[in-house]
Amino acid sequence: MTEPVLQIDSLVKHYGQVRAVDGLSLTIGQGEVLGLVGESGSGKSTVGKCVLRLTEPTSGTITLGGRDVTHLSRRAMRPLRRDVHMVFQDPYSSLNPRFSIEQIVSEPLLRHKLASRREAYGRVAAMLEKVGLRTEMMTRLPHELSGGQRQRVGLARALILEPRLVVADEPVSALDVSVQASVLNLITDLQRDMGFSCLFITHDLSVVEFLADRIAVMYLGRIVETGPTADLFAEPRHPYTQALLSAAPVPDPVKARERRRIVLRGDVPSPLDPPAGCRFHTRCPLAFDACRTVEPELADPRSGVHPAACHLVTPEHRPDAAVPGRTIEY
Amino acid sequence: MADQMAVSVGAVPAPGSAERRRRLWRRFRRRPMPMTGLVLVAGFLLLALVGPLVTGDPVTQDYAATLAPPSAAHPMGTDDLGRDALARIASGARISLQAGVLSTLLAMAAGIPIGLLAGFYRRWLDPVVGRLVDVTLAFPFLVFAVGLAAIIGPSLTGVVLALGFAQLPAVIRITRGEVLAIKEMDYVSAAIADGAADGHILLRYVLPNCAGPLIVQATVAIPTAIIGEATLSFLGLGVQPPTPSWGVMLTVAQQYLDVAPWLAIWPGVLIALATLGFNLLGDGLRDVLDPRSGL
């Protein structure tokens, strides 16, 4: 197998007492799109910032293209930034208000000394065309553009060096629904075309359903379930994933009436003091005694099934462990 | 496609664009207080720059007319040594302008880089700079300036240095605060991801975006320094006689308040007007430059 583009190993990031990310591991292969899904406060954006070294991880390792970058200085990190960039959530604060669109998109080229200002012009024009912006936009300032256009500029900036990995942190959630689809389609097309790997962070499972090869579901700083997108949608194994999927709207009203909704009660517990045992047990409709004391591992003994961190899936703590293979029912 | 549509209605023009400058000016012009300030400041600049060229010599003495009331020969009267008060007011304006502008430039030139670095390198530099700023801000501005002027020695250079140094903590604090806010913006994170070095980020991303509040601070600092110069000179710690300064003129005038009150009125009124002008202008600039004001 080829070297993974990104490998995160037991990443921990604490902001003071807040355990934003608490022991998270994931791998993204060449050309692979991983959807990292979780609700707000689950720590998913922190993961993205740690990958870019925009924030210092508390512990754990981050490996980019086989190189451990966890402890590189800012200066030593700089040349490696050719291979990884980021698309930010907020299209309004992610572009320098004093730079023209041309300046914004040419920055990566100029900062890595890959082009002179004159050479950069042509490449910026070509890149803008790729993201669906007319070259007249080059002289405009960010405030003159709509949210969708700004996000296309952010995409052009992230992709102009043809990086191996792009971290997309909720790139469409600040946009109007009508614009979301067009930007998502653009990201999909560009990814197929350019073949970059992508860590796509979102709170909305439906956004990554058609884009991601694999999905990792996060809850309170940990991954609770991960697997190929189709498997995860077809057979969600963690009660949290099941609840998330059941909350997504279904366009067909007949199907919508037939399906069972799992409504979670209460709020996400504070990451200041995550619950003991399984972090989800305070809201889990299926929780039993072991869930309150023993933390489930993200592993699966059976082959051919994707892993989920739940005692119902890894049966040694399960009360009805004598009944192997029993499906989870409500 | 919806997001391909042109500029949305009511878009905020970018700082620095011609369109924005025109809109700011239109907004500024309609407001009476900032315009009053602008007129006063323009008058003060005119007096300081052109005045000394058209009025007579400020140190020539006319013993035939000491403490003379305003007349055709001496429109503002004369002082105890028979020197023309108008010529001295005009020269004094030049001193005030120098003290105000030079000390503010000094404070900005030193304070902005310190504030930028302290805000940007919070871990190492900020605690040290922060405590020093807190300690110096604990002293009232004038007490601090008087102390410094006493150490440096009485002269215009001394006044400029003392006032510049006394203004420094405020400039550092304002710059630092702006940097802290701007550092959290995604475009700074994006610049890091672009591979930009710290110096590039500071000069091209952080500094231009904190210019607005600093311009306003400058318009507040200049009148403060003008009063500071007058105060220091009044106390004998600033510009020395016979060089005319509004503060020096007030010192002399207080001895003759009963026989020649105009000697105190001219510098007093002008200090008040110049200060008022800069303050009104600064308030107006703050309102107009504040992005939340809808421009």
Image (spheres, coloured by chain):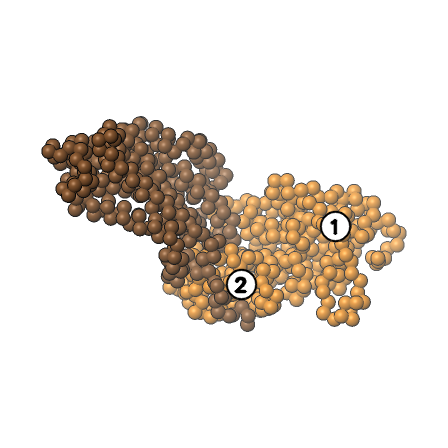
The residue at 75%/57% (across/down) is A243
Q: Chain A in the picture: what colour?
A: orange
Q: Amino acid at mark 2?
A: Gly
- Dot 1 lies on which element? loop
- Residue B137: x percent and y percent? 43, 33
Name the residue furthest right.
A322
Q: Chain of mark 1?
A: A
Element type at mark 2: helix
Q: Is residue A42 visible?
A: yes
Quadrant containing the C terminus of chain A is bottom right
Q: Nearer the viewer, residue A41 or B35?
A: B35
Could you tell me which chain the residue with mark 2 belongs to? A
- Percent across and percent down for residue A289 are 83, 45
User: Which residue is disc 2 drawn over?
Assistant: A147
**Which residue is located at x 27 percent, y 48 percent?**
B43
- The residue lying at 24 percent from left, 44 percent from top is B48
Q: Are marks 2 and 1 on the same chain?
A: yes
Residue A156 makes an appearance in the image: no
Chain letter for brown?
B
Q: Which residue is mark 1?
A: A266
Q: Is residue A155 left or right of residue B27?
A: right
On the image, the x and y values in percent for residue B250 come to 26, 33
Q: Is residue A23 above or below residue A111?
A: above
At x 66%, y 66%, the residue is A210
Which class describes the residues within 10 Å of circle 1: few (<14), some (14-19), or many (20+)? few
Q: Quadrant of the N terminus of chain A?
A: bottom right
